[in-house]
Image (spheres, rainbow, N blue to C red):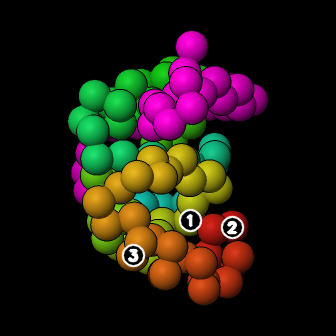
Amino acid sequence: MNKVGDVSANILVTLPQLAASVGDSWASQSLEPAKRATVLVIDDLDADREALRRVLEEDGYCVLCASRASEAMEILDQAPIDLVILEMLLPDGMAWNSAVGSAPTAALS
């Protein structure tokens, strides 16, 4: 059980199941529009990013991953993203807030 002041939490996300999975690195993945939902996972911890990627791909989502907010913003410029899962305590997380907070919602179609 988490106590007041703990920065860790357990989160369960349930999404509808879709088609087959794709590869490991966002740079090696096709940035063509997917026929299934595309999820962008942003987390600076490799293990957390990999765990989310694996679970989402097993459920058929196209998953793109970034370890920094600046990397995630590059992905957003190149790929249509349906859902963003963001670690709120990223070292460069304020860059994300500044850039995406003022971006039109169409950028995250």
Res 22 seen here: yes
Mark drawn on residue 95: 3
Tell me where residue 37 appears, x and y as whole percent.
63, 46
Tell me if 85 is positioned left or right of 69 in this view. right
Give above or below for 65 relative to 50.
Answer: below
The residues colored magenta run 1-30
> Which image quadrant for residue 106?
bottom right
Image-quadrant location for residue 2: top right
| Numbered label attached to residue 80 | 1
Q: Earlier in the sequence, mark 1 or mark 2?
A: 1
The amino acid type found where label 3 is placed reads Ala
Task: Give the percent coordinates (x, y) of residue 83.
Answer: 62, 52
Q: Residue furthest top?
A: 1
Quadrant (top left, top right, bottom left, bottom right) of the N terminus? top right
Graded by Cα atoms within 10 Å as few (under 14), some (14 to 19) or many (20 or more), the crowding at tag 2 reads few
Q: Is residue 80 left or right of residue 68?
A: right
Look at mark 2 in the image and give the residue it sits on. Answer: 109
Nearer to me, 90 or 74: 90
Q: Position of residue 12 (x, y in %)?
A: 63, 24
Type of the residue with mark 2? Ser
The residue drawn where x is 25% and y is 36% is 46
Q: Is residue 66 magenta?
A: no
Q: CA distance from mark 1 to mark 3?
A: 20 Å
Residue at 60% across, 83% down: 103
- Magenta stretch, overall SS: loop
- SS category of the residue bearing label 1: loop
| Secondary structure of residue under mark 3 | helix
Measured along the vertical axis of the image, is residue 108 above or below residue 60?
below
Does any portion of residue 60 appear in the rendered image? no
Q: Residue at x 36, y 46 (%)?
A: 43
Q: Which element type, helix, strand or loop, lies under badge 2?
A: loop
